[in-house]
Image (cartoon, rainbow, N blue to C red):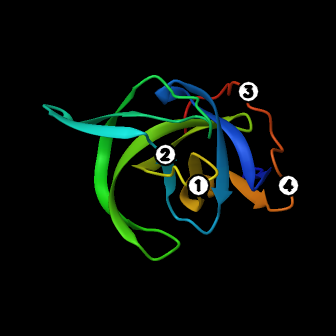
Amino acid sequence: MTDVITLGWRERLALPSLGIPVLKAKLDTGARSSSLHVEWLEADERDDGTWLRFQVRTTRRGGISEPCEARATGRRTVTDSGGHSTERWFIQADIELAGQRFIAEVNLTDRRHMLFPLLLGRTALHGRFQVDPSLSYSQTPRRASREPT
């Protein structure tokens, strides 16, 4: 097994495939999937599948990304920590965190009432990172040198 990097319960990361150089994320080993806050979302059916256009709020007070576009990987029901189920679109996104670059499946939802625009769940963390809840912002965002894994 490769060395697993220890991270804090919240970290800064990048979403290069969406053009987002830095974003605060909560690392949540209790959540299976990862969720990204989007301001608005439009679906467009094309010959090669469903494409989603959306905009990400990168900070709690302002900080709007350029409109993003990604091919949908599907639409599934997600149950939140309060037991409420909603149907959400999923995409594949490149993530740069702690010198690693990898692809993770992320659902797009309204997280405006949450402290962090991105919740990084255990599926994305598994085998790469462990979370120490006593740490916070333990890594500085930097360009990863590896291709997505």
Residue receiving disc 4: 135
Locate residue 88, reporting x and y percent: 34, 55
Task: Farthest residue to the bottom: give it.
Answer: 83
For residue 53, which quarter of the picture?
Answer: top left
Left/right of residue 4 with respect to residue 45 in the rendered view: right
Residue receiving disc 3: 142
The amino acid type found where label 4 is placed reads Leu
Mark 2 or 1, nearer chain start: 2
Residue 114 is labelled as: 1
Q: Secondary structure at mark 2?
A: strand
Pick the residue in front: 121 or 99. Answer: 121
Residue 37 is labelled as: 2
Give me the residue at 58% from left, 55% from top. Answer: 114
Considering only vertical position in the picture, is 105 above or below 144? Answer: below
Mark 3 or 1, nearer chain start: 1
Q: Quadrant of the N terminus?
A: bottom right
Q: Secondary structure at mark 1?
A: loop
Number of residues whose C-alpha sits closer than 10 Å to that of mark 4, classed few (under 14), some (14–19) or many (20 or more): some
Q: Do the numbered discs 2 and 1 sit on residues whose CB atoms are within 8 Å?
A: yes
Task: Farthest residue to the left: give it.
Answer: 47
Left/right of residue 38 with respect to residue 6 in the rendered view: left
The amino acid type found where label 2 is placed reads His
Left/right of residue 81 with respect to residue 28 in the rendered view: left
For residue 145, which quarter of the picture?
Answer: top right
The amino acid type found where label 3 is placed reads Arg
